[in-house]
Amino acid sequence: MSKDNVIRNARIVLEDEIVTGSVLWRDGVIAAIDQGSSGIGEDVEGDYVMPGLVELHTDHLESHYSPRPGVRWDTLAAIQAHDAQVAASGITTVLDCLRLGSDEEAGGFQRGEMRKIADALETARDENRLRADHLIHLRCEVSSQDVLEQFEDFKTDEHVRLASLMDHAPGQRQFQTFAQYELYYKTKRGLTDEAFAVFAERRVAASERYSAKHRRIIAEYCNDSGIATASHDDATLEHVAESKAFGVQVAEFPTSIEAAKASHAAGMSVLMGAPNIVRGKSHSGNISAKELADAGVLDVLSSDYVPFSLIHAPFVLSDGDNAMPLAEAIRLVTATPARAVGLDDRGRIAADLRADLIRVKRVSGVPVVRSVWREGRRVA
C-alpha cells in the first residue's frame, strides 16, 4: 500500500526560483509541489528544501581506504565512513573517484585495489549499507603505461558514469610550469634533487609515449558505451579543442580563464572545486572559481576533498558583492551535474523525479543540513 509523505512550510528550491509551500512524495517519487500554506505534513519551519546534492568528483573515499601512506583500512568500513559523511553533507548521489594508472609515488596503489573497492561498493549496495547512491568516476592517468589494463577491470561495470582523462606530467595541464611541479612533487614530498630529476624525467617520457594514444582509446570507448567523459586541468585553447573533438561533456578544473570560457562556449559543463569557493582561492594557485562564476562560465561544483563544501559553497556564492541568486547557485550542485552524466531522474524538485531531498537551515554563515531523504527514505 502506497504511503504519502508531505513536508510543508518549506522554502522550496526549484531549478529557477524559490517558492514557499509543500512537497508530496509517494513510493520514493515526487508526486506534487504545492505553493502556499498547508496544514498537512511535517512542518519544516521555513527551512530550505532542495534537491539532494549530486557529487561528480570526490577523492574522499580514497582517504578513508588509505588514511596514511601504506595503510589500508577495512574496505567496507572505509566505504561506510565515507558514505555517512557525504550523506550528512546533503549528498544523495556521489560519483566516487577511483584512480587508474599505476603511480607508486602518489599513493602506492596496485592494480586490483580500485576493483576491490568497486566490488565492496557493490556488496554494500546489496546489503543495504549505504545512505547515498554511489556511482563511479574513473580517474584515468593517460600517461601511465598500464592505464588501459586497469581500465579493462571496469568495462563491464554498469556503475561507471564518468571517466576523466588526466595527464599530471610536468608541462602539462595542471602543471604548466616546472616550478609548480617542483613545489608539488619535490618540496611537498621531500624528494632530493637527484630523486626529483629522475622522477620528472620519467613522467615526461611516459607522457610523450602514452598520453595521446591512451586518451583517444579511452574517450572512444566511453563515447561508444554511453559513459560521460571529462577533461582535466585544460589550460589552453588547444587543450579545449582536443577535448571538444573527443566529445568531452565535463571540463574539470580548467586552469585558465581562457580555457574555462572556451569550454563553456563549446557546450562542456565547467566544473570547479567547492573548496575553492569557500576558501576564495585554489589550493594549487590556479584560477579562482568565483572569477569563473562572475564571468558566467561556472556550471558545476564538486566537493573534491571536503564533502561539506558542496552545500556550503552555494550559500557563499549567494552572499556579498555580485551575488548569484541562490536557486542558480544550487543548480551548480544538483540539476547541472545530474544532466552532465545522464542522470535525468534526479537533481530537481519536480513531479515524477526521485524524491532525493534535503532540508537545510541557514540564517547566516555556515548552513546546517537537518534532514536527508534518498528516494523518499530518510537517511540522515
Image: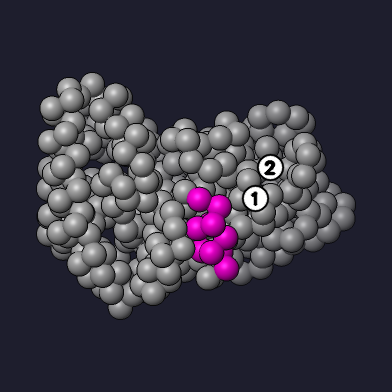
The amino acid type, in three-letter code, at marker 2 is Leu
C-beta proximity under 8 Å, tags 1 and 2: yes
User: Number of labelled discs?
Assistant: 2
Q: Which residues are magenta?
A: 256-265
Q: Which mark is residue 317?
A: 2
Dot 1 surroundings within 10 Å: few (below 14), some, or many (20 or more)? some
Identify which amino acid the numbered label 1 is placed on: Ala
Instruction: Please give left or right for residue 73 compared with residue 308 in the image.
Output: left
Location of residue 318 in the rendering, given as x and y in whole percent from the top left corner: 73, 43
Image quarter of residue 26: bottom right
Q: Is residue 16 above or below residue 373?
A: below
The circle on residue 293 is: 1
Q: Is residue 78 left or right of residue 199?
A: right
Q: Which mark is residue 175?
A: none
Residue 175 rendering spot, x and y as whole percentages = 35, 43
Instruction: Return the residue found at the far bottom.
Output: 224
In the foreground, 101 or 10: 101
Residue 50: % across, % down: 66, 50
Please, what secondary structure does the residue beneath circle 1 have? helix
